[in-house]
Image (spheres, rainbow, N blue to C red):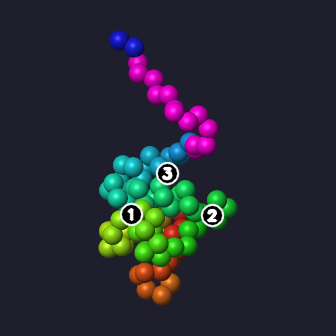
């Protein structure tokens, strides 16, 4: 029996995920991992920061703001990202750590 091969439909424009993705995949819920991937894709590539409100993240991910807020808490709880809250729970910056 041969080993199955994975062939990318789009051979360009993708990125290799590092050990942080592997670790996040094993400790985060599906929703929190999806938020983490979104943050990684949208963050400033020099600073690792993403400035967004919960409502903006919810719209971008087509999720309820309450679910996104819970996912943010989970990212922080597992020390995957640091959430810097400005003006309460609805505004803030995600910082990859």
- State the SS at label 3: helix
Residue 46: x and y in percent read: 67, 61
Q: Residue at x 43, y 68 (%)?
A: 59
Q: Residue furthest bottom?
A: 87
Mark 2–mark 1 Cα distance, whole angstroms, equals 22 Å
In the image, which is nearer the foreground, mark 3 or mark 1? 1
The disc, 2 or 3, on the residue closer to the chain's N-terminal end is 3
**Total numbered labels:** 3
The chief SS type of the magenta part is loop
- Residue 13 part of the magenta segment: yes
Residue 27: x and y in percent read: 35, 54
**Where residue 20 is drawn, which disc sits there?**
3
- State the SS at label 1: loop
Find out whether the residues at labels 3 and 1 contact each other: C-beta distance under 8 Å: no
Q: Residue at x 35, y 65 (%)?
A: 63
Q: From the image, which quarter does the N terminus lie in?
A: top left
Q: Quadrant of residue 68?
A: bottom left
The disc, 2 or 1, on the residue closer to the chain's N-terminal end is 2
Q: Quadrant of residue 75?
A: bottom left
- Residue 28 part of the magenta segment: no
Q: Residue furthest right?
A: 46
Label 1 belongs to which residue? 62
- State the SS at label 2: loop
In magenta, the rendered stretch is 3-15
Q: Is residue 42 left or right of residue 85?
A: right
**Where residue 44 is drawn, which disc sits there?**
2
């Amino acid at each position: 029996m041969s080993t199955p091969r994975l062939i990318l439909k789009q051979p360009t424009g993708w990125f290799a995920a590092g050990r942080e993705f592997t670790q996040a995949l094993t400790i985060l819920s599906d929703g929190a991992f999806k938020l983490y991937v979104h943050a990684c894709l949208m963050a400033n590539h020099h600073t690792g920061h993403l400035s967004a409100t919960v409502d903006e993240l919810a719209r971008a991910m087509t999720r309820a703001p309450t679910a996104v807020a819970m996912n943010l808490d989970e990212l922080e709880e597992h020390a995957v990202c640091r959430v810097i809250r400005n003006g309460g729970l609805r505004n803030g910056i995600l910082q990859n750590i």
